[in-house]
Image: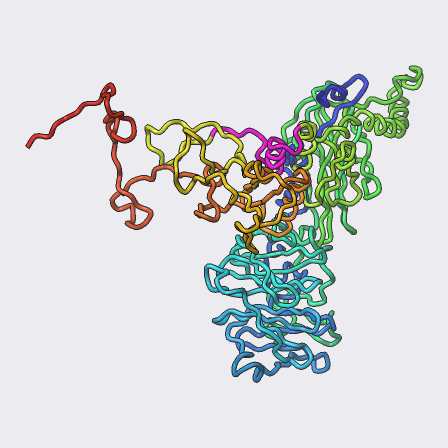
Amino acid sequence: MSTAAYLRAPPAPPDDPKWMQICALTGWRISALSKAIEVAPADGALMLKQLAGSALTDEAGTFGGLVPPSNAALDPDGNLWLLERTKGLLQRFDCCTKKFVALPCTGGIGPGVRQLVDPGGVAAFGPNILVTDQGPPGRVLVFAREAMALRAIWQPPAGALANPWLPAAIACDAHGRTYVADPANGAIHVFDRSGVWREAWSGFGAVSAIAVDKFGRVYTLVPGDKGVLLSDRNGDEIERVYEIGSVARCFAANPIAGNGTAINLAPFCDGAGWYDLDGGAIKPPVPTPPIFAAKGTWITPALDSAIAGCTWHRLVLDARLPQRTGVVFSTYTSEIDLPMAMIQTLPDSSWTAIPAISKDRDEALILSEPGRYLWLRAELTGRGQETPRLCEIKLEYPRITLRRYLPAAFGSDPVSSDFTDRLLAIFDSGFRSVERKIDDQAYLFDARSAPSAAGRAGVPDMLSWLASWIGIAFDSTWPVPRRRRFLRAAAHLYRCRGTFAGLRGMLLLYLGLDEPRPPSRRAACARPCAPAPHKWRPPTLILEHWRIRRWLFLGGSRLGDAAVLWGNSIMGRTQLDVNAQIGITRLDETRDPERDPFHSTAYAYTAFVPARFGRTARERNALQRTLDAETPAYVQSTLRFVQPRMRIGIQASIGFDSVVGCWPMGVTLDQAQLGKATVLSPGERPDTGPRLGQTSRLGAAPRGMEIRRSRR
């Protein structure tokens, strides 16, 4: 039964108030009177306007000052290393002389091996300093911090990339995993702490700066982009970050301050000053301007309650208010919809202030006079480097309090009724919160609405609790949408668990192919007379091996490569003095040679899955675990990932992983280039009737077939 049968009707007068929600999903309703505010592109929060030059995308690769520049690195002992790219020198800052000292770059493994041809970035981990050199050839040089001996040279394996790699920016996480940007291939190369190349993440573009936060997440910057791409440890995109404040707490304190073109080492070393990115001392530049506007005003257009003489009850705020930032709300009500030009001329005394809202208090009563229309004004204040962020606002109306259960004497006049309403609103808010939990209890028992923790602290994982009722344990790598689909279909899959239908249904759920899709459009290269495309059908995915037995059947088979005679060679049993050979025949204690052919490939199958679901070892292992959990113990399973191409003898099963493309378009003059991908236009083929070898029969002339004699 649907959850809607257990839910109450939407709240409405006379017993319950209504709600009006204002957020990014419903629209912030920003009028033309608003000043110095904007909507954050990352999460849709309302905040103070971000000033120019305060984004994460600075040219030096400091990500707004969260990390040192891409040509600088701090080692675990607190030493600062700087890469002078013009001369190819690696320098170390000397706190005694307050200068950068160039280190020798001669000797080492062979002549000139230590010489930097075109250095890109520098990083430090443990006792090593890692420097990228774009070469050619591209390489990562690993130096010992103490003696500056060249320990190793890292490079990806030969043939792993389409283009010669071009190592640029470099960063290490807390466990020694190293990430190297490769703009030539648009990839991020991953090396382990011993220098072994593990994988390359493609599709990142020409990355110029890279950083890793305290949680091991990777930040990459491409010149020209407005935001920074945030990825997890597997290279999967999490989100795009646009503001410094949203990720500032994810990084450790950076003692190397700067403005993108120079660095300030005064916090790093007493007596030090400003230096350019090549290590030369310079004069202090102009102070860094603020990131956000100091003050902003948000005014909504008229909010219509559709209730004459409506008493707006309260405001509930979901916001993030850093220290020394704040927001002050005020309202104005009217019985008629006033133009915004008149609202602009209202004095401050016409606006009624809402009691202060802080971190510990997220709601307040609206004290304006009754009126059908309401205008909400919010004044945001900050200190230049931080901004308040309004995530969601709820307005509750009309005011329905517990006074309706009291004698009429408590509301005999407007003053006493207002006092009684505001006093009882304190208790009414607590009662309604309990009632709301009871009314929404049905949502907790539906797979589509039950809350799921999914790695978030403080959120109850009701979805996993529901799954435990029927013995389901979700894999930790499953996303929440997949968990919901699997739990909803569990009752149907349990009835056929371990069968072909059950395995196929589980795979369709895992791959997201269980929902019906609209018919595909006609291909652009299809002929005008081509038939309309068929409706989309889920793929088979499972191939049972008994279906590919190459046996001969009387009256229905023919000799050839696809035929196997019934004999002892099917199972390869050992027979003394006949075919007993080590490594060829097998010793089987079960004596049933007459039914051996039926046992061959009787309990085995292969699952064909698109390769994009097995890009990493974590994804492949998660899919294998899910498949093993649904496969009977006596069945042998094989998981095969299908690449977007057909490979005869390796990966080619008609009906499972092979696709026949449509007929290509012909050659067009001045538009096509002759080569492997061009064909001559076949033109319209007339209907010539039956053709010998396909639709004709010897001994009888089918209708429409003519025998013509040639004339000489």
Is there any visible trace of residue 49 in the rendered image? yes
Above or below for 124 versus 2: below
The residue furthest left is 712
Residue 368 location in percent, x, y? 78, 29
Q: Can residue 518 be found in the magenta stretch? A: yes
Q: How is the image coloured?
A: rainbow
Judge by depth and name the residue closer to the eye, 593 or 132.
Answer: 593
Judge by depth and name the residue closer to the eye, 355 or 522.
Answer: 522
Question: Where is residue 304, by image quadrant?
Answer: top right
Residue 193 location in percent, x, y? 66, 66
The residue furthest top is 408
Q: Is residue 331 left or right of residue 556?
A: right
Above or below for 469 versus 52: above
The residues colored magenta run 496-519
Question: Where is residue 410, by image quadrant?
Answer: top right
Quarter of the figure that contains the C terminus: top left
Residue 215 location in percent, x, y? 71, 55
Q: Residue at horizontal 45%, vertical 35%? A: 552
Residue 682 location in percent, x, y? 26, 37
Q: Residue at horizontal 82%, vertical 31%? A: 365
Q: Can residue 163 be found in the magenta stretch? A: no
Above or below for 249 versus 45: below
